[in-house]
Image (cartoon, grey):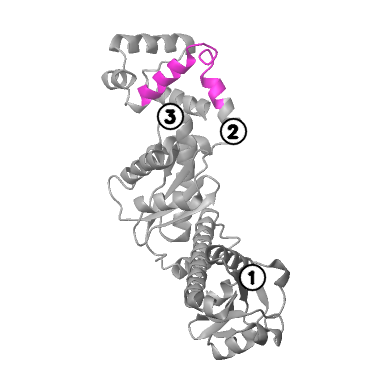
Amino acid sequence: MAVGDVLTPELAQEIACDIGRITGFNVLITDREAVVIGCGDAGRLGTVHEASYEVLRTRRSATHTAEQARRLRGVLSGMSLPIIVGAAAVGTVCLTGDPDEVRRFGLVVQRQTEILLEEAALLRSRLLHERAVDDCVRDIALYDPEVVDAETVEARLTELGLDPRLPRTCVVLDVRAGGVSRMSLMRTVREVFGGGQDVAGELAAGRYAVLHASPRSAHGPAERCSALVDRVRERHGLDARVGVGEPGRGVAGMHGSYRDAAMALRTGTRLEPDRRVFAVAELRVPQLVAAAVRQERVRYAAALLSGLREREDWPVLRDTLVAWAECGFHLVRTAERLAVHRNTLLYRLTKIEELSGRGVREPRTAMALYLACLADVL
């Protein structure tokens, strides 16, 4: 983006007022047509500063006494200096006052104006880049081959300096309400996922996605996700939860990874509210249950859990059935997971069999009850 394009009337007015307040002089800024676009005296906005024509043409500063100023339209005694960007003058900055007095401040004011303009251009360029990144991440999250070609999305990734052929694992971050700016939070995310081929963007308020490029490993990005949750809590005082997909290649593969990560986040928080990181690899069975039509899940759970769900201790019985299945129907492992004595576990299993009329020590029946428990939670 050209720096000259950033010299808007709003920015010119802000710079003129700020510099005027610091120096004590009335500061005026014109555009490249010598029209006043910033001034401490609002009545001069939109007028022509005739002395700036020559300054813009020659790109050299000029002073004008009170007598010289009277012969020029819209000019008071003082000094006019060009605002130079590259080899072009994009406007002028003028100080009103005795020429000998304002000359001492002229070069400082000129350079300060150019610095502020460069900073504004840099900020705007950065914001445009951030918007492009957010749009690209959303394109992948919402990808529909019936609406947009994969090649179009891949071209946007390439424009951002990213290789669309690399497999990437999607990480979805959900941050509970807080007054933290997007830029501040994204800085924290990129500290943890800072690889040259990683890309992170905002999906919606409080919801972010990272497409993490890394070779497949035993742990994947799980350790990074735990570190991210800790850092968000320590630095911003916010509670965060993370869903992790599995590596996907190409736009369709990354979209699938995003869907898995979003599902893991949604399902995992219901199954284990106290956890903060949920990997889809550990939630494939709940994912399958969640994919069923809701009415069918309700019917299935009602049919298998009759006689159990109506009881006050149903949450305890449900946790027992879930642990029983996930521990491979092993008494010792299940008791350890539930932190109960083996005899207590045996008592609960017997109680479930009596209330449901189903033999929970028969694996097929136990698995059916396990799926019904998941359907009940979901």
Query: Residue at the spot x=54%, y=87% of the render?
Result: 59
Instruction: Determine the CA span between mark 2 and mark 3.
Output: 20 Å
Instruction: Give the structural element (helix, strand or loop) at label 1.
Output: strand
- Marks 3 and 1, the one that precedes in the sequence: 1
Tag 2 secondary structure? helix
Residue placed under numbered mark 1 in the picture: 38
Q: Which mark is residue 294?
A: 2
Is residue 311 part of the magenta span, yes or no?
yes
> What residue is shown at x 48% (from left), y 35% (from top)?
267
Q: Earlier in the sequence, mark 1 or mark 2?
A: 1
Q: Amino acid at mark 1?
A: Gly
Q: Is residue 293 visible?
A: yes
Give the amino acid at mark 2.
Arg
Q: Amino acid at mark 3?
A: Glu
Mark 2 crowd level (few <14, some 14–19, many ≥20, 10 Å Cα): few
Q: Residue at x 63, y 80 (%)?
A: 77
177 relative position to 53: left or right = left
Magenta span of residues: 300-325
Which mark is in front, 1 or 2?
1
In this rendered view, identify the residue nearer to me: 48 or 274: 48
Q: Is residue 152 above or below residue 61?
A: above
Residue 257 shows up from this direction: no
Q: CA distance from mark 1 to mark 2?
A: 61 Å
Q: Which residue is mark 3?
A: 272
